[in-house]
Each structure stands twice: as C-alpha cells, then as structure tokens.
Image: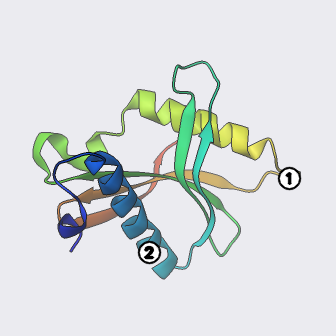
Amino acid sequence: MFDKAFPRSGPGAAKAAGDAAEAAALRHLQAQGLGLVARNYRVARGPHARAGEVDLVMREPDGTLVFVEVRARRSHAQGGAAASVGSVKQRRVVYAAQHYLQRLSALPPCRFDVVAIDGERLEWLRAAFDAGG
C-alpha cells in the first residue's frame, strides 16, 4: 500500500518518498478526525544549523494542537521508522513548534506525535515525546 508510493532511487527519490509518506500520514490523521492546520512549517534560523521543521500541524476536534513528525522506512530493519526520531530530531521539532506557538494569541493544549511508516505498516504514536526533547 505505502511501499509502492516510495520511489527507490534516482534524482529526488528521497524527497518524493518523504512527500508520499507525509501524504499517507495526512490522509490517515484526517480519517481519524484531525484537521490540517499547516504542512512543513520551517524555522530557518535557530540554535542548530538546520533549526527545525514540523511535517504536519494538525488540530484534534477538542482543540488540541498536534505537531506531527512523519518517518518512513522500507522495512522495520535497524529499529524502524519510529526509532529514527532521536533526541536531536525531537529538539528541532520542539523548537519549530515553539516558534509556531509564538504567533498565537492564546496557547492551546499541545502534543507531539509521530507517524511511523515501515513498508506497508503505518503506526500513529500519540504523545510520542514531550517538549523536553
């Protein structure tokens, strides 16, 4: 199902695979009742060379803002997609989320989720990490 959408090689294959994974994650989350707020929210400058990015910013029906990191791997080998969201990546997502929240007049409840896609298997990990990174 998902694996066929991920190009295996060639120019732009990684970007195309990432885009396909994000699209699959977005469809799944929307089917679960979440609404899309923003996609690929980036912060260009920060304490890191690559400051931060949030793949999907979603909203739960109860108003909770959900910052989603999407990861895809062809298989579960070497720990799989979920295991690839390490502490450095978490800090970058948190940094971008904090930047995003500064634009809001009131802070809603928030959480950090991961959508991990390993081959044909999609797993939505709610509250996968917290702002402590």
Q: Residue type at mark 1?
A: Ala
Q: In which quarter of the image is residue 33?
A: bottom right
Between the residue at mark 2 and the residue at mark 1, the CA separation in whole angstroms equals: 28 Å
**Residue at point 81%, 46% (across, down):** 103
Left or right placement of residue 72 versus residue 25 in this view: left
Would residue 102 be seen by someone viewing this image from the given angle? yes
Which is nearer the eye, 128 or 71? 71
Q: In which quarter of the image is residue 34?
A: bottom right
Left or right placement of residue 98 versus residue 90 in this view: right
Q: Residue furthest front?
A: 11
Picture coordinates of residue 12, whole percent (x, y):
31, 47
Q: 10 Å neighbourhood of mark 1: few (<14), some, or many (≥20)?
A: few
Quadrant, the N terminus: bottom left
Q: Quadrant of residue 132?
A: top right
**Residue at point 71%, 44% (across, down):** 100
Would residue 131 be seen by someone viewing this image from the given angle? no
Residue that label 2 marks: 27
Picture coordinates of residue 108, whole percent (x, y):
75, 56
Left or right placement of residue 76 versus residue 114 in this view: left
**Residue at point 27%, 59% (across, down):** 117
Q: Residue type at mark 2?
A: Arg
Picture coordinates of residue 40, whole percent (x, y):
55, 51
Q: Work out whether mark 2 precedes mark 1 in sequence or the reverse, and give the earlier one.
A: 2
50 w.r.t. 63: above or below: above
Q: 10 Å neighbourhood of mark 2: few (<14), some, or many (≥20)?
A: few
Residue that label 1 marks: 106
**Residue at point 86%, 53% (across, down):** 106
